Amino acid sequence: MTVTEFGFRLLAKDGKARRGEISMPRGTIRTPAFMPVGTAATVKAMYLDQVRELGSDIILGNTYHLMLRPGAERVARLGGLHEFARWPYPILTDSGGFQIMSLASLRKMSEQGVTFRSHVDGSVHELSPERSIEIQGLLDADIQMQLDECIRLPADRNEIERAMELSLRWAERSAIAFGTQPGKAMFGIVQGGDQPDLRIRSAERLTAMNLKGYAVGGLAVGEPQSVMLETLDETLPSLPVEKPRYLMGVGTPDDILQSVARGIDMFDCVMPTRAGRHGLAFTKDGRVNLKNARHAEDPKPLDETSDCPATRDYSRAYLHHLVRADEALAGMLLTWNNLAYYQRLMAEMREAIELGRFQDFAAETTARWSRGEAARKAA
């Protein structure tokens, strides 16, 4: 059956954990889903064919970075981001809101939008809610995000409220600019920092806009994990159960596991790719730092039971050597391993929810990570 419209359906629930599917013309997204970050039209150190083979249904691109280079208009002339990057499946684009925080020294803000001075060549670029949606349309993104203001925590309540209210006004302008795009969706972004009443106000006003999906933004930006999880507990009841929920920029495997338990459906994070480029591997027994000298003569692979060649076929000694020698292959193999682990974790969570044993799965997984961490400290 040909899919012509964006749709979301829940297939199973176990407690608050949800197993669902997002249907779009370019493919089905199995949820809970992890979206590898392809900021500049590439998932760093990976072929996109590999990313797909690992189980990724969707990847993420970034409006700000693609605006700077190669430019949204150029990508459009070359057939859109899917054709440009050879990824014919769904793509979600971040609006540039995160860069309002991360590149604060290079931007000026007003009610109208943001003016950035490029970190690449110093050129000046204006990004309003309307221009952000225009760029995402030129990229031909399947899921587009409203422009919002993300601020780092902890922050003063007045500043959190100001940014939240601005983000709501920008959501309205983004929705008007997005209009009706068959088969595509625009998501709103809940802001409000670590203030429960502001989060609820933001969620309720966004819900009233009847958008296709809702993200929780402004978390994992300096606050402890406990604050992030408490914020989810307080926020998610105010979001509609029949719409997908996306936790932006999160996170570690434990962050994801804990957030799925609270009802989150979608995630993205640079952690698996960035960690891989810095010698850190994620495995079913927790993290392995391949920079550590203890691996110099270890003939064991990261996991001999894995179906990922990077995980199964290369010794820890060889990976250690590549990392210490600063070889490009180190980042390639460890990123491959990390994305394989993340996608395997998502698949296992989806299966556990379907079988009604998510709580047991979460407990078993956490216990295994803890045993692995204890064993590494004792070695």
Image (cartoon, rainbow, N blue to C red):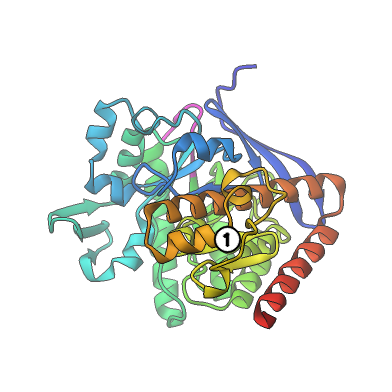
Q: Is residue 373 depicted above or below 138 in this figure?
A: below
Q: Is residue 71 depicted above or below 348 in this figure?
A: above
**Which is more toward the observer, 277 or 164?**
277
What's drawn in magenta, residue-wise? 179-186
Q: According to the image, label 1 marks what residue? A: 316
Q: Position of residue 319 (x, y in %)?
A: 51, 59
Q: Is residue 81 depicted above or below 4 in this figure?
A: below
* The stretch drawn in magenta includes residue 183: yes
Locate residue 12 relative to residue 282 in the image: left or right: right
Q: Is residue 172 visible?
A: yes
* The stretch drawn in magenta includes residue 69: no
**Which is more toward the observer, 281 or 215?**
281
Q: Position of residue 280 (x, y in %)?
A: 52, 64
State the count of labels: 1
Q: Residue at x 50, y 64 (%)?
A: 320
Task: Work out which quarter of the rendered image holds the C terminus and state it.
Answer: bottom right
Task: Work out which quarter of the rendered image holds the N terminus and state it.
Answer: top right
Q: Residue at x 49, y 51 (%)?
A: 333
Q: Is residue 250 visible?
A: no
Q: Main secondary structure of the magenta part?
A: loop
Q: Residue at x 57, y 74 (%)?
A: 294
**Which is more toward the observer, 346 or 158?**
346
The residue sitting at the top extreme is 1
- Callout 1 crowding tier (Cα within 10 Å): few <14, some 14–19, many ≥20: many
Locate residue 268 relative to residue 14 in the image: left or right: left
Q: Secondary structure at mark 1?
A: helix
Give the residue type that dot 1 points to.
Arg
Locate residue 85 relative to residue 345 in the image: left or right: left
